[in-house]
Amino acid sequence: MSSAILKVEALDAERLVQIHWDDGEESLYPAVWLRDNCQCPCCYLDSAKARKLLIEALDVNTWVKHLTLINQRKMLYTQGTDFDLLILPVHTLGKLQAKKEAESQNSLLLNSNSTLVHQAGNQHECQYWGASLQLPTLDFEDVLTSDEHAYNWLSTLKKIGIVRLTGAAAQRGEVAKLGKRIGFLYLTFYGHTWQVQDKIDANNVAYTTGKLSFHTDYPALHHPPGVQFLHCIKQTATGGESEIVDGFNVCRQLKEQNPKAFQILSSTFVDFTDIGVDFCDFSVQSKHKIIEVDNKGQVIRINFNNSTRDTIFDIPVEKVRPFYAALKEFVDLMNNKENKFTFKMHPGDVITFDNWRLLHGRRSYEAGKEISRHLEGGYADWDVVMSRLRILKKAVKIED
């Protein structure tokens, strides 16, 4: 898109910004969408092409007070009610400029990726939990060597959504052993396993020392990994606590408290993207509903990572603010002190959890001259996990 902006104005009553392009086209952008997609260093990690701004910090009712075009009309600077400075490259707006046929519906640019819905078949037998969770814990070596302990591990993972294994060596390679125990790990663009630690020019927001808000991993894939392993090799003295929340439980609460918000999040397709270089170079995109339900209305998967939620958003302009309001309520429920469970991993701990059900986060910690916190991670597919669980069930002679 090579068009330049001729004129930009704020429509205060509608909380919209209207842009007039030099080719005669006009576009409308909700103020909340502009705020959400600010690309200043505080809101955007350029090395990872990912959002740093948290939904918790977003004011759904924001409106624009001042607009400025600089750098030969290549950069839009904005001031609003809940922020001092918002920076958006005009080429980003150009990418999202509505075409004539879409403007008749006040719609942002369509990205027509289809969605693939995958059901694990194991999400219906679960036990909800909140802040009072008694974290299930087993011995790492017992799981590797005993079929009975391995069965207890995977059956509890299926039911509760998380199991902690203790006693692993504080070195790389332990996650690979778990992969071999169940069959094999799930290869992604970050490799068979990956190292979570503070990195220069990080290609993922997890590879920084900042706070990570609640998220599921890899919604940018059409088939996100079902199970995640995180092995603590080194832990910082202060900060870096892990936070988890039972997403299915939060969905149940949202549906009870605000059925309309639940309906919006379970029916609106959201774009996710991840671009960079790691195991190999990659540029992946997908569309998912944040709350995925089956044909009976049962929640089967949550797809949400605010850092990789794309700027592209294919819904009518008038539905943008209601979407953000629903998403913010969902995130507020996650952060409710009665719902989230906080703990600190220690070297040798391995957290194994359901990436389709749990959302996880991390508190910030201080960066040092040396790496002060190091986790090794890996993924597994639910098909592989369930296959091993069925085999173990027969091996230990568990009857239905």
Image (spheres, grey):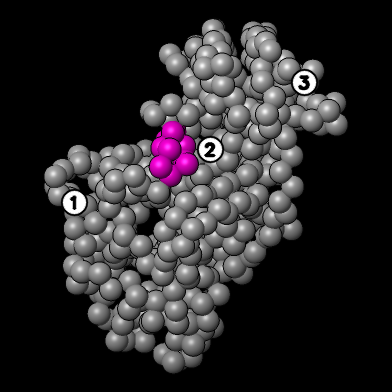
Residue 251 in the image: x percent, y percent? 56, 46
User: Could you say which quadrant of the image residue 239 lies in?
Assistant: top left
Q: Residue at x 54, y 10 (%)?
A: 68
Which mark identifies residue 23?
A: 3
Magenta highlight on residue 45? yes
Q: Does label 1 or label 2 sit earlier along the sequence? A: 2
The local secondary structure at tag 1 comes to loop
The residue that mark 2 highlights is 330
Q: Residue at x 27, y 81 (%)?
A: 142
Residue 320 in the image: x percent, y percent? 66, 28
Residue 158 in the image: x percent, y percent? 48, 68
The residue that mark 1 highlights is 371
Give the amino acid at mark 3: Asp
Q: Does label 1 or label 3 sit earlier along the sequence? A: 3
The local secondary structure at tag 2 comes to helix
How far is disc 2 from disc 3 in space, using C-alphas?
40 Å
Tell me if 338 is positioned left or right of 37 in this view: left
Residue 291 visible in image: no
